[in-house]
Structures are given as structure tokens and as C-alpha cells.
Amino acid sequence: MALDKDLEQWLRLSLLPGLGDKSFRQLLFGFGSPEQILNASRAALGKIIPARLAGAICDGGAHERLDAVACWLDDPANRIVTLADAHYPRALLQIPDPPPLLYVKGRVDLIDRPALAIVGSRNATPQGVATAESFAKALSDSGLTIVSGLALGIDAAAHRGGLAGGARSVAVVGTGLDVVYPARNRTLAHALAAQGALVSEFPLGTPAIGANFPRRNRLISGLARGCLVVEAAPQSGSLITARFANEQGREVFAVPGSIHSPLSRGCHLLIKQGAKLVESAQDVVEELGLPGTAAESDGAAAVTDASGQALLAVLGFDPCDIDTLSARSGLSSDVVSSLLTQLEIDGRVAALPGGKYQRVR
């Protein structure tokens, strides 16, 4: 289909090589609209941007990729939302550097609803994955759309939990929306497109470039009322998102973990710096002042066997091997191994590398 004239003018500027978001916003502030920018003189434009870019705008702006965008917009699930659009998220208007336009696939209404960001390690433990999915489901049912970044591990778990709840989930990605990254999350991306939404500030065709992912993190936090970190190493990208959240005036929450786990250190660091320690979804609901309650749902099967319950008690929540569990419980290694197998089937224990097991809450 042919592009709407107004949208085409936004695209001619946003797709112009070398014209960054900051310069685009400065032009909008100076001239009022893309149409007025495109009709401005080279001299007037040159007071804000370099002469080369001023000349390119006077020549009509970007001419390439417009047809590709028009074809993408043929799909009724796809939408481009500009700063002048009524659907532009009000939350992003509060941050210092809102993108001039957003590419959206799925339910565009979700990007302007009360939301919570949930982020964490790509190499999450089974416990962390279960915690993130459980929190996300409960918080989605409490009315918060779950925002995350479609990465492996905690992000993916948060999206699954959010989609299972009533308020659904939004993924903010670091590529163009015609690129799925990581490829292992393709099925999840399709589910988000069908039931939730995918959002990107990057043009179609933008590949996975390392520098784009920290940049998109400001949008993950910016769309939300708060940011919950579940498992993070001290130097992880999740702490970048938490820092953006703090700078944007959002609440920062962290789930504590074992002092022996490297993936707990980032959360513990955030707590030391003032993040709210949370042990349940209800803690987040109360801190944000939301109405109603959020019941935390772990979905795990109950273990009724007395020996299994006893083994869970001595296992605790730290990784542990069979020999140590045998010594703690007084049971033989064969009996412990058999019980662990049943607990793993029940979804209460997960096997880890190195012959260790960890309880899944």
C-alpha cells in the first residue's frame, strides 16, 4: 500500500543516514513538524545540523527503504507510532530522549498501559526462570503489562508469564522488527506478536548490533512504572536497565538470592544501592500502590511423599550434589537419586551442570 503522506515525511527524516534521534528532535523543536522541516531552507536547517545533512533534507530526505516499510505496513498487525501520534506512550514522553518514532507489531494499545519491566540474566538458573515467570504471571494478572527485552533466560520467562496473565507482555528489541533475535526465541516472538506486542526504535532490516541493546534498555525501563531485576551478574546489561530506571524516576526492585551465587551479586548490589528488596509479587503491587492483590503462582506440583518433602527441606535453595544431600538426610545415594528424579518430574527440582541439583520454588 502507499504510505500516508504525513508518515512518509516522518520516515524520510528518520531513515536519513547520519541524522540521529537527538538532531531529529532538535529539528522538530525548531520547525514544528516533519513537513516544515522538509520545506525549510538549507540556511535555516544549517543552524541546527551540519550542512551535509541540511542538503540531504532539502533534496527530500531519505528515498531508500520506503517501499520496504510500505510492504511491512500491509500487515494489519504492524504499525508505526510517531511522537505526534495519540498512541505514542505517555511514559516515554517523560524520559530525556524519546525516539521520534516506534515500530510496533501486535497490540499497539499495550505500549501505553501501566507496565512493569522484568529483566535479568541470559544464563539464568532454573530457580531464576521459575521466579521470573511466576512474578510476571501474578503481576500481569494484577494489571501490569510486563515489559522485557526478548533475550534468553529471565527475559523470555518474564514474557511467558506476562502472556499467561491478563495484562499481557511487550518486548522491546534491539533489531528491526523484521529480524528475530535470538533465533531461539522465534516461537515466543510469534506469541508476543499475536497476543502482546513487539516494539523497536530501529528501522526494518537493522541486524543484531551489540551497541543497540544497551540503548534499547532505556525504553524497557521508560515504558514501565518500575523495573524488577531477577538474577544478574555485577556487570550485566540488566543493571544498565536498572540504572536507566533510577535516572528516569522509576522504582527499582530486586529479588535476593544465595550469597554463593554469582547471579545474585547484581541484585544484592542494587539492594545495597537502595533498590527495594522483594520476595513476592505482592511486594511490588503494594510498593506501586496498585489496587487489589496479586497471588503468586508457581504452578509446581505438590510433593506429598514424606521422604521427598524431607529431601526438599535439607536441599534448601542452593545448588547441591547427591553426596552432600545423602550426608544431610541420612539416606543412601541411591535413594536420594531416586527421590531427585521424582522431584525433577514433579517440577520441584532442576538438574544443573556438574551433577548438582537446585530446588525450584
Image (cartoon, rainbow, N blue to C red):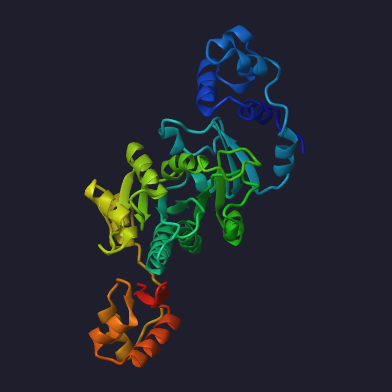
Q: Is residue 114 left or right of residue 322?
A: right
Q: Is residue 225 visible?
A: no
- Looking at the image, the residue that sits furthest to the top is 43
Work out which quarter of the rendered image holds the C terminus and state it. Answer: bottom left
- Looking at the image, the residue that sits furthest to the right is 1
Relative to 28, say whether 299 is above or below: below
Work out which quarter of the rendered image holds the N terminus and state it. Answer: top right
Q: Quadrant of residue 316?
A: bottom left
Q: How many tags in the picture? A: 0
Relative to 14, say whether 161 is above or below: below
Residue 319 in the image, given as x and y percentages of width and height:
33, 72
Q: Quadrant of residue 301?
A: bottom left
Residue at left 71%, top 34%?
65
Residue 314 in the image, given as x and y percentages of width and height:
25, 81
In-front residue for pair 223/123? 123
Residue 69 in the image, given as x and y percentages of width and height:
70, 38
In-front residue for pair 361/136? 361
Residue at left 46%, top 51%?
148
Residue at left 35%, top 42%?
243
Relative to 20, say whether 39 is above or below: above
Q: Is residue 81 visible?
A: yes
Relative to 274, say whether 346 is above or below: below
Q: Quadrant of residue 246?
A: top left
